[in-house]
């Protein structure tokens, strides 16, 4: 796992044992030492950093800083990618642009604060400074969200990794949260 650089306690590196399908240029971030379940950041041909996942659960403010540093050093990263075995074994590493695939779109705004309202509504403020509303009744019929039917459980909502979350590892996709929320309560 070639290390590219360090930022404080975080290491930015390539993971040598990639799985299928092969992916375009990307780096992994973990605290301390490389690990298999690390945060993955794609780098577009234009040098933009896009989060593929945050498996390391890096706090949002730290992740944003790390992504800006990756963008600042994108040419160094791309040069190291081309020199590494990641590039040599990957036919997509130069011709495959993330802007050309659906999951390569820029990130939607992320939640920064949340308030539980009556009738299972959430009032959410996003990084775009928008205030939007999300009706939890739309999802609590699903088995994984069933605990949200309990008003006391529902009220203990918090922000985690740019989305809403509750105890027992219940959370909601940050992109879906933004797309399915509305500018005013329904």
Image: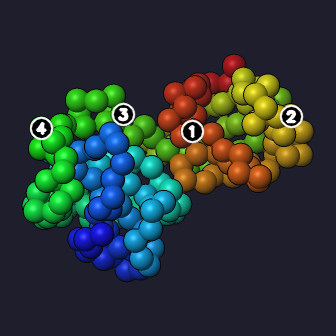
Please tell me which of labels 4 and 2 falls first in the chain.
4
Q: Secondary structure at mark 2?
A: helix
Q: Which residue is mark 3?
A: 103
Please tell me which of labels 2 and 1 falls first in the chain.
2
Q: Secondary structure at mark 3?
A: helix
Q: Which residue is mark 1?
A: 173
Q: Secondary structure at mark 4?
A: loop
Spatial CA span between label 4 and label 2: 48 Å
Classify 128 as above or below 179: below
Q: Nearer the viewer, mark 4 or mark 2?
A: 4
Which residue is more in the foreground, 73 or 110? 73
Spatial CA span between label 2 and label 1: 19 Å
- Specify the farthest residue to the top: 186
Spatial CA span between label 1 and label 4: 30 Å
Q: How dense is the environment of label 3, judged by Cα within 10 Å: few (below 14), some, or many (20 and up)? A: few
Image-based side of 74 in relation to 144, left or right: left
Please tell me which of labels 4 and 3 falls first in the chain.
4
The residue at the point 18 percent across, 40 percent down is 92
Image-based side of 69 in relation to 129, left or right: left
Q: Are marks 4 and 3 in contact (CB under 8 Å)?
A: no
Give x and y (percent) for residue 137. 77, 26
Q: Which residue is mark 2?
A: 149
Q: Nearer the viewer, mark 2 or mark 3?
A: 3
């Amino acid at each position: 796992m070639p290390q590219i650089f360090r930022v404080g306690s975080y290491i930015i590196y390539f993971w040598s044992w990639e799985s299928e399908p092969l992916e375009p240029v990307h780096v992994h971030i973990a605290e301390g030492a490389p690990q298999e379940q690390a945060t993955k950041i794609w780098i577009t041909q234009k040098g933009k950093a896009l989060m593929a996942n945050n498996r390391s659960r890096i706090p949002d403010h730290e992740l944003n800083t790390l992504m800006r540093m990756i963008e600042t050093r994108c040419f160094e990263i791309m040069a190291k990618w081309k020199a590494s075995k990641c590039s040599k074994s990957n036919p997509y590493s130069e011709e495959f642009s993330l802007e050309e695939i659906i999951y390569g779109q820029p990130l939607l705004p992320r939640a920064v604060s949340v308030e539980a309202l009556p009738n299972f509504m959430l009032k959410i403020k996003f990084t775009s400074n928008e205030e939007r509303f999300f009706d939890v009744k739309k999802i609590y019929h699903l088995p994984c969200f069933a605990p949200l039917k309990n008003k006391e459980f529902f009220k203990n909502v918090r922000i985690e990794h740019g989305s809403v979350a509750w105890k027992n590892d219940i959370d909601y996709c940050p992109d879906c949260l933004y797309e399915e929320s509305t500018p005013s309560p329904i």
